[in-house]
Amino acid sequence: MQRTVLLAKIHNCTLTGANINYVGSISIDEMLLEKAGILPYEQVQVVNIANGERFITYAITAPAHSGMIELNGAAARLGIVGDRLIIMAYGQFSSEELKNYSPTVVIVDEKNRLLEVRHYDDLLSKV
């Protein structure tokens, strides 16, 4: 049996743009994608902390170290610049794979600069 489990998330990032005329997706600083282990064109769930919107789209790369997080296409109507977002990717895992598994958490500052890369087990042990 396969289970769908959180693979990675970029936590509390700041929306830097919204482009309604783009074909679709969410543009994310390439370095943040790499640190999270999220691939270009991978499905992601986006949660807007400011307004409670939750939606699914796919990730595309923005220039590395640019701090860009931009909603594109129809998703651009679901947030405004300055909103805080959580971007999550999920994976399919077997029970065996899950025995030693912990999701990756990328933590950024208000300008989407990398603060640290953690794993959920580390974070939860400090609660």
Image: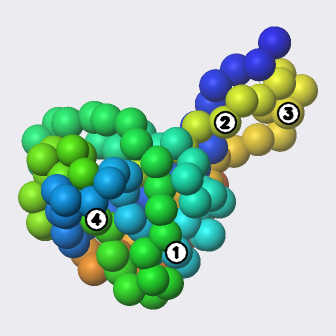
Q: Residue at x 49, y 84 (%)?
A: 64
Q: Residue at x 19, y 69 (%)?
A: 17
Image mark for residue 91: 2
Crowdedness of circle 3 by 10 Å Cα count: few (<14), some, many (20+)? few
Image mark for residue 30: 1
Question: Quadrant of the image for the N terminus?
Answer: top right
Label 2 vs label 1, nearer the camera: 1
Label 3 vs label 1, nearer the camera: 1
Mark 4–mark 3 distance (CA, rounded to whole Å): 33 Å
Give the mark, 2 or 1, whose residue is nearer the N terminus. Answer: 1
Q: Secondary structure at mark 2?
A: strand
Mark 3–mark 1 distance (CA, rounded to whole Å): 27 Å
Residue 94 position in % (x across, y down): 83, 24
Mark 2–mark 1 distance (CA, rounded to whole Å): 20 Å
Give the mark, 3 or 1, whose residue is nearer the N terminus. Answer: 1
* Amino acid type, residue under disc 2 in the picture: Gly
Report which residue position mark 3 lands on.
97
Relative horizontal placement of residue 106, taking residue 37 as reference (left or right): left
In this rendering, the answer to whether 38 lies above or below 98 is below
Count of residue discs: 4
Label 3 vs label 2, nearer the camera: 2
> Given contact means CB atoms under 8 Å apart, are the residues at marks 2 and 1 in contact?
no
Choose top left, top right, bottom left or bottom right for residue 111: bottom left
Report which residue position mark 4 lands on.
70
Q: Secondary structure at mark 3?
A: helix
Choose top left, top right, bottom left or bottom right for residue 69: bottom left
